């Protein structure tokens, strides 16, 4: 990525749909929104990718532990939006998380349950 601080300059080849297509399916897209179905099976790790737009992520199935890794493979502290929300969630209904743009990284589903949700990205 040429300019880490400005998501509009992030490498488009690392966009979630381009870099991790097995995990990110476009359900709808126009000039203002992109809606993704996101699936990560138990024990699977996504390829390195980013999400350059803010979003709302609605999980209908998720269980911890979920781990984040840097592109270099370093496990990151559990401070990402989803991980914090999952730790505070009581498990009823859907888990809804407001997400800031996410720089390149990988996610490992270390749980015994598939992660499934819909992510609505707001293009800015």
Image: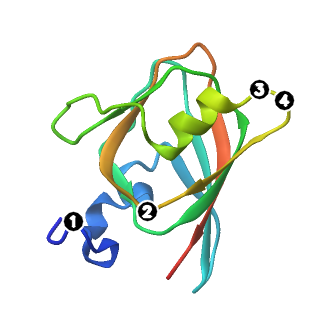
Q: Residue furthest bottom?
A: 31
Cα–Cα gap, marks 2 and 3: 25 Å
The residue beneath circle 2 is 101
Assign a secondary structure to mark 1: loop
Name the image quarter holding residue 107: top left
Sequence-first tag of 1 and 2: 1
The residue carrying pointer 2 sits among few (fewer than 14), some (14 to 19) or many (20 or more) residues within 10 Å by Cα, namely some
Q: Are marks 3 and 4 in contact (CB under 8 Å)?
A: yes
Cα–Cα gap, marks 4 and 1: 36 Å
Residue ID at (65%, 37%) = 116
- Coordinates of residue 14 in the picture (x, y in percent): 30, 58
Cα–Cα gap, marks 4 and 2: 26 Å
Can you tell which of label 2 and label 3 is closer to the viewer? 3
The residue beneath circle 3 is 90
Q: Is residue 81 left or right of residue 33?
A: left
The residue carrying pointer 1 sits among few (fewer than 14), some (14 to 19) or many (20 or more) residues within 10 Å by Cα, namely few
The numbered mark at residue 91 is none
The residue beneath circle 1 is 4
Residue ID at (62%, 76%) = 33
Q: Nearer the viewer, residue 29 or 68?
A: 68
Name the image quarter holding residue 45: top left
Q: Are marks 1 and 2 in contact (CB under 8 Å)?
A: no
The residue beneath circle 4 is 92
The residue carrying pointer 4 sits among few (fewer than 14), some (14 to 19) or many (20 or more) residues within 10 Å by Cα, namely few
Q: Is residue 5 left or right of residue 20?
A: left
Residue ID at (59%, 13%) = 112
Q: Is residue 11 left or right of residue 96?
A: left
């Amino acid at each position: 990525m040429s300019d880490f601080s400005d998501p509009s300059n992030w490498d488009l080849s690392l966009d979630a749909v381009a870099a991790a297509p097995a995990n990110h399916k476009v359900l709808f897209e126009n000039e203002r929104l992109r809606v993704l179905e996101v699936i990560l099976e138990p024990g699977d790790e996504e390829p390195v990718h980013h999400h350059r737009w803010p979003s709302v992520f609605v999980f209908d199935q998720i269980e911890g532990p979920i781990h984040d890794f840097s592109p270099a493979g370093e496990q990151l502290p559990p401070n990402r939006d989803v991980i914090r929300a999952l730790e505070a969630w009581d498990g009823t209904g859907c888990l809804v998380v407001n997400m800031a743009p996410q720089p390149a990284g990988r996610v490992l589903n270390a749980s015994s349950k598939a992660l499934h949700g819909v992510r609505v990205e707001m293009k800015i």
